[in-house]
Image: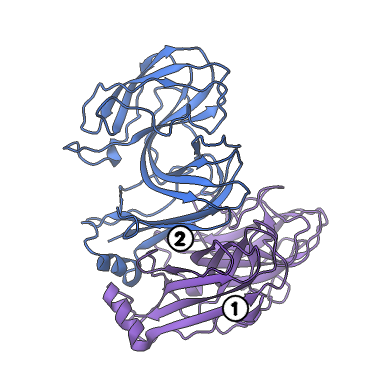
Chain colours: A blue, B purple
Amino acid sequence: MPFSTVDSLVNALNANGKGQFLRFHKTMAQASVANIPTTLWKATGIPAAGTSTTNGPANGRTPTSSTTGAFTYTNATGPATMALVRLGWTSMIASTTGSLILVDRMADCNLNNAQATSAITGLDGSSRCAATTAPGDGGQIWTEVTSALSAASNTITYSSYTNQLGTAGQSSQGVVTTASAVVGRSLNANLWQGLATGDTGVRSIQNLTLTAGTATGAYDLCIVRPLGYIPCQQVATWVDRDFVVEVPNLQKLFDSTCFMFIYVPTAAVTGTIFGEFAICQN
Amino acid sequence: MTTGFSTLDTVISSAVAGKMQRLGFSKLAATAGVALTPRTTWKDTGTPAAGADPTLGVGNGASPTNRTGGGWPYNGSATGTQNALIGIGAASGTASSTGTLILCDRQAHIQLSVAQATSALTGMDGTGRMAATTAPGDGGMLWAECTAAMSAAQNTFTFTYTNMLGTGSEVTPNVLNGSSTAVGNMAFQTTGVVTYLWTILATGDTGVRSVQTVTLVTNNSATGQYDLCIVRPLAYLPIAAVSQYLERDLVIEIPGTQKLYDSSCLFMIYLPAAANTPTIYGEARVCGG
């Protein structure tokens, strides 16, 4: 039972007080690399810094709104549903312009860069996915370095994943890791890692194949759902996005969504940002 | 019975029926700001008039209202209605005065010395303008503004508070007073270099209802004073270019229609993009429905 009219949103926000205003304030744990997507999962501030799973392919998990690092909020009371209605932010450090991407961290698993070909367990975001009936539903593959990579490249394939339609055994495009990649950044220059032809999303990942390389380091392999994108073109200058009328989508938020941000910086910075987003149930 | 707006039509009908209040403001900064460092407008001169600090001391916390000097005067909601913030606009009239304005309700404040010994605080309670503690709860953010210039030396302290769910004895991470911070500017740093607009809370907390104690963790003989405040952020407004008026519709454009508790003590925090002594003018619109 989602919102059916603008009036129902006005009623929920004001007359019924069903909005929740989630404030954030984050300082990056390390310097970014210009134009390379960087996680804010372990940035300090509000909410507190998140943590990785224990390293290893058997340790996948489904983080929630109660996991340290996530934004604490209260789920909708059924049959009502929760939706993202607006997002705003700015930065407090020189040169901290770029784009911010609000995502649901649906599943994650910490792996070595040189993890041998193996099965992965627990890397399953399907509890916060819609049905597999066409067009189906799934997240994107996001990778974030947690221990700096050594000065060589590996090639990794997520050689068995289940796509948006529930089709198992799909294989990603090869991921060539960047030599000497620093902590926090994507494994390569990609925001989302390439999927098999025709696929639009990933529900779970079952296997990885190390195709080439022995470079060391570690990373979080994540399935994330992008929820909102917002630019910051000028330091200290607030930017808002309305997701109802201005940029319509009123994205449904599944219960226990684990909110986090990915930041795409225009320059190498150790940024401090703050902002607020609003969610509301009908 | 309090109602509030149930449709967009009721916002329009209330506004044209005379239930809207236009709260004009024009403020000249009392002190120069520092680039990218949030500063208060509480004691800036103009309209509304400059506010005053609470008397220094742990026993002098207070909950300022719309009738407190420095707050924006406006009328509370009529019986059976509630006020909501429906719009805000502003521009700056001073070169280089770009940045961001944050309109807040100053729910409670207390003035302390950075050398304040560990003590209980009284009167530092914003619950008079908060919703219930049932999940998700409700609380403000901790904001601190320098009221007497600080020394280069830095003391370390924490605060014990009650969170948005009514859970007491929550403790902030260590905070430091700013080093050589000037009057008006944000008073705290979380480490020697990192500054936060809102003081960091315990893991999982999203808000503060009241503050019970200050604990002096490390005394490095720092000097200076600050107002510790519980504030509710109500709206954010960019000033992207000098002398160019920007507005936010808070009903449709940026949905919020944030409930305005009666007696809210409205004031602004300004994040300047550059060092300046700005003049800022604008208007907020409040409507009862």
Chain ID of residue with mark 1:
B
Which one is earlier in the sequence, the residue at label 1 or at label 2? 1
Q: Are marks 1 and 2 in contact (CB under 8 Å)?
A: no
Residue drawn at x 24%, y 55% is A78
Whether residue B77 is visible here, answered yes or no, is no
- Which percent across, then down, holds residue A134? 17, 37
In front: A14, or B2?
A14
The residue to which callout 1 is attached is B26
Q: Quadrant of the N terminus of chain A?
A: bottom left
Q: How many marks?
A: 2
Q: Quadrant of the C terminus of chain A?
A: bottom left
Instruction: Give the spatial CA distance, label 1 vs label 2.
Output: 37 Å
Residue drawn at x 57%, y 34% is A33
- Which percent across, then down, holds residue A32? 57, 36
View extreme (left): residue: A133
In front: A174, or A30?
A174
Say if labels 1 and 2 share a chain.
yes
Of helix, strand and loop, which one carries label 1? strand
- Which percent across, then down, holds residue B52? 68, 78
Residue drawn at x 46%, y 60% is B165
- Above or below, comparing residue A216 to residue B51 in the picture: above
Of helix, strand and loop, which one carries label 2? loop
Chain ID of residue with mark 2:
B
The residue to which callout 2 is attached is B165
Disc sitting over residue A107 in the figure: none
